[in-house]
Image (tube, rainbow, N blue to C red):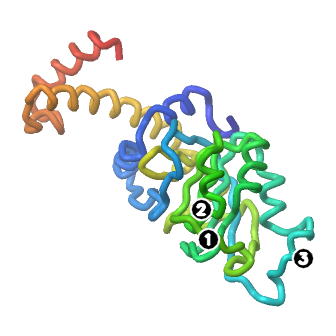
Amino acid sequence: MAGLNEQTHEKLMRVSTATLTTAMFKRGLRNIFLQGVQRLRPGPNMVGAAYTLRYIPAREDLDNLDSFADRENAQRKGVEECPPDAVFVIDSRQDASAASAGCILATRLQARGCKGIVTDGGFRDTPEIAELDMPGYHARPSAPTNLTKHHAVAVNEPIACGGVSVFPGDIIVGDNEGVVCIPLHMANEVADEAAEMTVFEDFVLEMVKQGASTFGLYPPTDPSTKDRFETWRQEKRR
């Protein structure tokens, strides 16, 4: 996958967005979870480099059905140029009153090897998009054509999505809770830490289910916690 080594990709496929936000908070990044964006259908994690589309408000003299015939139409051009293994991220200004895309374009992205599609607006044809192998994230269903509210103006430039700055090539990770954006230069170290955090949190959860108090356990301020964790880890081969 472009921009990621295989080990980092595999780690990001196994960690939660909640854990990733904590790992990034430790590095001073607070605003990396896309607000108001939900997955259409539960499934495995989505991981890929951001390929972006930006909308501005529609204008009646420009946004008509004939505009789709223009090969420079940014929406259609973006879909046809999105590289394999990318996540197509759409800046819809958090406006879900018209569709950001529909099933035909989403299906085309899947056929091109895209790893997912994300918008802070809405999709039309959501029952069909939900059935694709490629995950989709949006704010809510929206049947009206994008032309009623959105003018596609830029492809693969910095955007805002869900209140988060997304730069082309940033690593987008989605799970069944939501979507986070990881700056590419941080991806390896964040993935390493998140993977380690996940192992420890699995240990903590098992202990809590067995009746343990969280005091001294989470965070591990009791010196014995680390010893018990190492023993558990060896037994579980984690």
Q: Amino acid at mark 3?
A: Asp
Left or right: 32 as drawn, with respect to 171 = left
- Residue type, mark 2 in image: Thr
Point out the image quarter for the C terminus.
top left
Mark with earlier residue (1, 3): 3
| Residue 178 position (above or below residue 190) | below
Does residue 88 lie above or below 144 as drawn? above
Q: What secondary structure is marked by label 1?
A: loop
Query: Mark 2: which secondary structure?
Result: strand
Residue ID at (10%, 23%): 224
Taking the spot 70% from the left edge, 81% from the top edge, the residue there is 148
Circle nearer the viewer, 2 or 3:
3
The residue tagged 1 is: 92
Q: Which residue is mark 3?
A: 66
Q: Position of residue 147 (x, y in %)?
A: 74, 77
Q: Residue, x 39% and y 59% (percent of image)?
A: 30
Question: Label 2, on which residue?
Answer: 119
Circle 3 packing at 10 Å, graded few (<14), some (14-19), many (20+), is few
Q: CA distance from mark 1 to mark 2?
A: 7 Å
Of mark 1 and mark 2, the one earlier in the sequence is 1
Measure how far apart labels 2 and 3 are at the Cα level: 24 Å
Residue at point 55%, 26% (across, down): 7
Near-viewer residue (78 or 181): 78
The answer to whether mark 2 and mark 3 are in CB contact below 8 A is no
Which residue is most to the bottom? 61
